[in-house]
Amino acid sequence: MTTKTRSIGKRRPPSTLHAALEAAKARPTIVQGYDECGDPLDVSSTQKPDIREAAATMMVMDALTDRDIERIRMLDSCVVIECEVAWEKWLSEPIWNLVDKEISRLNVIPSSKADIPPEDRLRSFPETTVVLCRNIEEIAPEYAGAYDVRLRISGLSADQLKRLIGTSPIIERELTDEIALSVSAVRLFMSAHKEASGEAIFQKLLTIYAAEKGVTSKSAVSHKSKSKPYLDLDYIHGMPEAVKWGRDLAEDIRAYKAGQLDWSDVDPGVLIGGPPGTGKTIFAQALAESCGIPLIATSYGAWGRAGHQGEVLKAMRADFKRARESAPCILFIDELDSIQSRGNSKRSDDWWSTIVNALLAELDGAEARDGVVVVAASNYPDKVDPAIRRAGRLDRVIKIGLPDRVALAKILRDHCYESDVDFDRIAQRMVGKTGADCKALARTAGRRARREKRELKTEDFLQELKSSQKPRAPELQYRIAIHEAGHALLGSLQGSLHSVSILSSGITSGGAIFDDRSAGSVRDIDDMIRDWLAGRAAEEAILGRVTIGSAGHASSDLGLATVFAASLETEWCVGDSGLSWRGEVNQHNIGNLLAMNRDVAGRVEARLQRLYSEALEIVRHRSNAVVAIAEVLMDREILDGHEVAEIIRINKPIMVSKRAKATDVMGMH
């Protein structure tokens, strides 16, 4: 930790690692010192950047004021540095970087020679003298009373160590000044390998600190702060488009705050869409942190607590007012799809029209919102009123999908301290899960380790994943694997498969997850319906009979296929029912709609039968690939899209059917 015993002049801003390393770049130097007999030593060398020198530069430069630097640059200046022996060798170099090397030499007097009076060191050239000592009372009075600058440097502070090696959620959470103060030049050098990350360096330093204290690394940080961990866009994984937009916004905000950019040139907001648990709220928090501005978080649920429309409007306007008063800031509105689009609710359209109109007035009404970036979140961005998504409001829509295996491993690592856990192996079993699932798993795995009073292990995570699954008979497990392999086959052939799993989740016994894809044409919808029907088709083609697993609830394969087939006829008007719009179709009204419109029901059934036949032909044509996918699923339980594609590539079609060949490439890659 660096402190000053005397403060003269304006305090300089903290140095950065970049500046410290710039000062330590390779250069020829001549350092004037003295041997044991008091004779001068000239040592010529080419010095290379060293993390120890960078750390010393940071400590010294942080302690100096502008006035101190002026004094050091004078001829015959004397600098007394009270320091620990652990850093003594490195602290003179930052002083040497400040002097005019053409007309001066550096006279370094270590603590062992600090009792030699200055008159014994007179030379024919000017000198900058640096006296290193434990305490100023230990040195000769000629030095103690004639110094120009006096510094006391005890070691690195936590802030300096973070600036030196970088930061992460773990470092922010665990690093304290006590741990940083224990870092010596030798320990820092031994921990900082060429390719080591900041987190790896910190973990090695922590291990050394814990060994010195005679405790485990876990116990060494048991006193850690309970404050909220630092979080910015560097620690957001699995949403590259959103992160890129956020970084661009942060640059614009900095330019706006510096007066270099007008607010009209700053993106006014964004609508983030994606499934629950994918990190929309965390993204808003990280965005505000990266931009260096406050976050004001609200939601329609918060506005609507009172129930009365007047209170809803009052709460909404109050949040926007608070945001304008805090500008520049981020106003985060969660659950935006809870505000129903105008014209979609026959019974309460007047209510929602008033709410939407009030929100539009706040977004771009007479009262400007300069300095306020609105970030809204929705599980169903397509359901948000089109006027809200109009240019100048929330016209930018960024959809967040499920994180891939690499992103899952990073998310798990951010939630755990331990470095010896195989996060990649765990992430392999979690493909198709969300960031929220990772957080929950880390919590339960940590609880398991705490109960057994030991460090967290990879097996804790795997056991927690296993315990969440109900045991199945091998025959049932294979049937489920065949069913999901059928979905995986068609999804992979279309290039839209994200992952496939036979792990149970909620009311489902497995599932194939598809990447977000456009649904702008009849062909697109037919592809999606064919995917949903492929599980049942695989059961029939491979096992010889079907089960009830494809139906039974609104979100089942047949439930979704039926809703989309009906939407083609009545809502989207691209089927064979003409141009008349017959209303919105959803899982709640599909039964009544088909019962009361037999012509529509007939066309929906015909489409489903046709697409099922096509799916059946494809599965039969690729039956060896379906079986191969199922067998790997029996062993691994989960596969990502790339792994499925490789299995299909290896297992070529085993039967030739003109119809299957034609269908196999229809709308597929």
Image (tube, grey):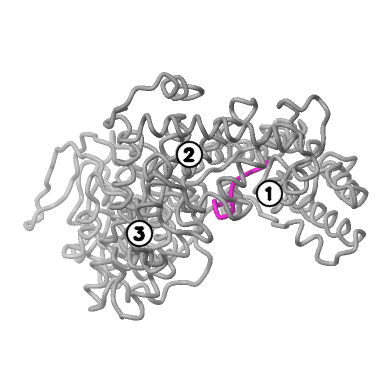
For the point 41% across and 21% down, the residue is: 661
Residue 19 vs 504, above or below: the answer is above
Depth check, front residue: 136 or 666: 666
The furthest residue to the front:
544
Which quadrant would the C terminus be assigned to in this image? top left
Q: Which-is-in-front pick, marks 2 and 1? A: 2
Disc on the earlier residue, 2 or 1? 1
Residue on which the image places disc 2: 534
Residue 330: numbered disc = 1
Relative image position of residue 480 (x, y in whole percent): 41, 52
What is the x, y in percent for residue 471? 37, 67
The disc labelled 2 sits on which kind of residue?
Ala
**Spatial distance from mark 1 to mark 3, Cα to Cα?**
51 Å
Residue 517 on image: x %, y % = 56, 33
User: Is 310 left, or right, of 250 in this rendering?
Assistant: right
For this view, does 146 lie left or right of residue 184? right
Q: Which residue is mark 3?
A: 147
Q: Secondary structure at mark 1?
A: strand
* Quarter of the image where the N terminus is located: bottom left
Of labels 1 and 3, earlier in sequence is 3
Q: Nearer the viewer, residue 614 or 4?
A: 614
Q: Earlier in the sequence, mark 2 or mark 3?
A: 3
Q: Is residue 75 above or below residue 474?
A: above
Q: Is residue 181 left or right of residue 442?
A: left
Of badges 2 and 3, the one in the foreground is 2
Instruction: Name the residue nearer the viewer: 21 or 619.
Output: 619
Disc 3 on helix, strand or loop?
loop
- Which amino acid type corresponds to the residue marked 1 in the rendered image? Ile
